[in-house]
Image (cartoon, helix red, strand yellow):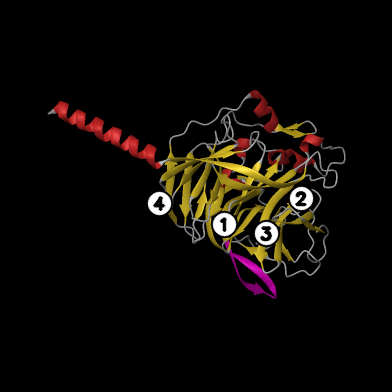
Amino acid sequence: MKTYNLFLLVLLTMFFMTSVSDAQELRNIALEELWNIGGADDDDHLLKVVTSVQRDGSSVYFLDNATSKVYKLTIDGELIAVYRVDGEGPGECDNPADLIIFGGNQFGLVKAMPGRIIVSDLQGRPEPTIRFMTKVMPEPGERVVFHLPYTKYRHGYLVSCNAVMYLDRESKTTALSIFAVRDTIRGTPVAREQARVLEQEYILTFDMPDEADIPHPFNYDVWDISSDGKLYVVPDRHQYLVQIYDDQGKRLSTINQEHEPHRRSAQEKEFLSYMGEGEYMQVEDFEPAIKGLYVDENDHLWVRESRSDHIPGVYRQYQVFDEQGQHTQIVNLIYPGSSFRDDIIFLGDGLVAIIKGKYDFPRKSYFHENPNSKLGEEELAQVILCRMIDQ
């Protein structure tokens, strides 16, 4: 009887492993380059700190944070316009942190501090600036600053990692929030916080932080939102863990897997720690377990894990989960080189934008206002539009 039970257990284990292997389809996708702009060979467009690439129908927009310029191109690569958005006047924003497309020829320039969104058509006809109202309320007369480092607008949802800085208390409260722009106060649009997750308290300091001290959700890539308002977020850098919330902040489910993270080489640690001009950040020995999330048009979750940029012959690999949280695919993106220093932005309809050198940006953006700071040719940013082709 014991022998029969052991034999049955082995058969069931083999069946389960075979089923999982069959379910996890391996999909190779080539990235076919359509056009590129910037880089060391493009003397006409010296791009520095490209922080955002957006698509609006047949047009592609991207923001160079360092020069406060927004570029508009067609999908075919024709440069239509370059908009200067720097300044403090209506519809202007010095060093915008991000670019948002609201539709209807309305664009949002995200001002990180004090946090707000300056709405404009990019042609000098501004709309009222969007202010933010959080559920964290200061004491009367207390000095506070609202910090809005990263913001996404997808499917009608405005999502942001944010910090409320209490200058008198020397503390700050961070959170990942879903905002709804529904009403105005004295003619000014107000984004009211309707959901608030992963709230944490910190001592307020303006010193260079260690990597381990930065809240993981404050990394732009590790959260995204689906078409039905589900918020996917990675709460901790050390775990292969994705928490899923509804648009009211209620946790619905989790995706959790065993994972052995990539150990950084000495060269990788040196690259990540150097911030320029003799400044260094203390970095961890291992890559974060999850480095990026993307929810596609079918509400399937693409996970960029710590080894995704370190697979020979693969530009970047993603683990894909369906709406029920089942691991269904392994996707290999095929393109020359490694994506370790690059960012990939999915624009829909099989279009992908690559920002070459995106992860040079922490040190470049930290020091680009320093007149003694210089960018080498290898550090010039480049935007590449590609089409995904199944192999």
Please say if the residues under marks 1 and 3 sit with CB atoms less than 8 Å apart.
no
- Of the residues shown, which amino acid type is indicated by label 1? Ser
What residue is disc 4 on? 324
Element on which disc 4 rests: loop
What residue is disc 2 on? 64
Q: Camera-side residue: 166 or 177?
A: 177
- The residue that appears at 79% across and 70% down in the rendered structure is 125
Q: Camera-side residue: 206 or 24?
A: 24
Residue 79 is left or right of residue 104, and the answer is right
Q: Residues within 10 Å of mark 1 (few under 14, many from 20)?
A: many
Name the mark on residue 177.
1
Distance between mark 3 and mark 4 Cα atoms = 30 Å
- Of the residues shown, which amino acid type is indicated by label 2? Asp
Distance between mark 2 and mark 3 Cα atoms = 13 Å
Q: Specify the segment rendered in magenta.
A: 179-192
- The residue that appears at 75% across and 54% down in the rendered structure is 96
